[in-house]
Amino acid sequence: MRALCTTLVVTLLVACSDGRERPLEDRLQRVLDTSLQKHDVRGASAAVVFPDGDIWLGTSGLSHESVAMDPGMFVFVGSITKNVVAALTLKLAEEGRLSLEDPLSRWLPDYPHVDGAITLRQLLNHTSGLYMFWSNQEIWDELKRDRARV
């Protein structure tokens, strides 16, 4: 997956600087399509925000079963979510909007089986003691059964 992301970024940069006459949107879509084929990826969604604020949205391949990817779909981003949430949390701490010593109870309602005294720092360090819910086969089965469930 890392190879695909790196390939997409580099190829998108090259496509943006390519002087050919085809519209940029067409070139970006071609890069997305060929990258999926090259790396044997089932489906992907990509967005490019240009300096002027314009946004290009592209999709390629399948979401699940025979359902084509669509820019309006919610997608599961997997483990990269942890990196993004961690970076945003640290940025908010840097800005003084929260503290890494804040307990969960300051920001979230009570949840069964979750200690509200767990700190944001403990979550970021993976030292909170929370159960790794992905280890529960029932959750995986439910996700597969009802992919639209939030």
Image: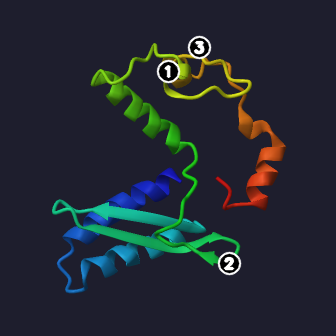
Q: Report, in whole angstroms, how far the alpha carbon at label 2 lies from the one at label 3.
A: 45 Å
Q: Is residue 1 left or right of residue 46?
A: right
Q: Type of residue at label 3?
A: Ala
Frontmost of labels 1 and 3 is: 1
- Image position, residue 98 (x, y; %): 38, 22
Q: Which mark is residue 106?
A: 1
Q: Is residue 29 left or right of residue 63?
A: left
- Residue 133's disc number: none
Residue 47: image quadrant is: bottom left
Q: Residues under labels 1 and 3: Cα distance?
A: 9 Å
Mark yes or no: residue 120 visible.
yes
Task: Identify the residue position indicated by label 2 in the image.
Answer: 66
Q: Residue furthest front?
A: 109
x, y percentage for residue 49? 27, 61
Q: Nearer the viewer, residue 62 or 9?
A: 62
Residue tagged 3: 117
Residue 3 left/right relative to 78: left
Locate residue 68, reporting x and y percent: 58, 77
Disc 2 marks which amino acid?
Ser
Q: Residue at x 23, y 69 (%)?
A: 16
- Of labels 2 and 1, earlier in sequence is 2
Q: Residue at x 19, y 69 (%)?
A: 17
Q: What residue do we see at 46% from left, 13% from top?
A: 101
- Per the image, label 1 sits on a secondary structure element best described as helix
The structure's colour scheme is rainbow
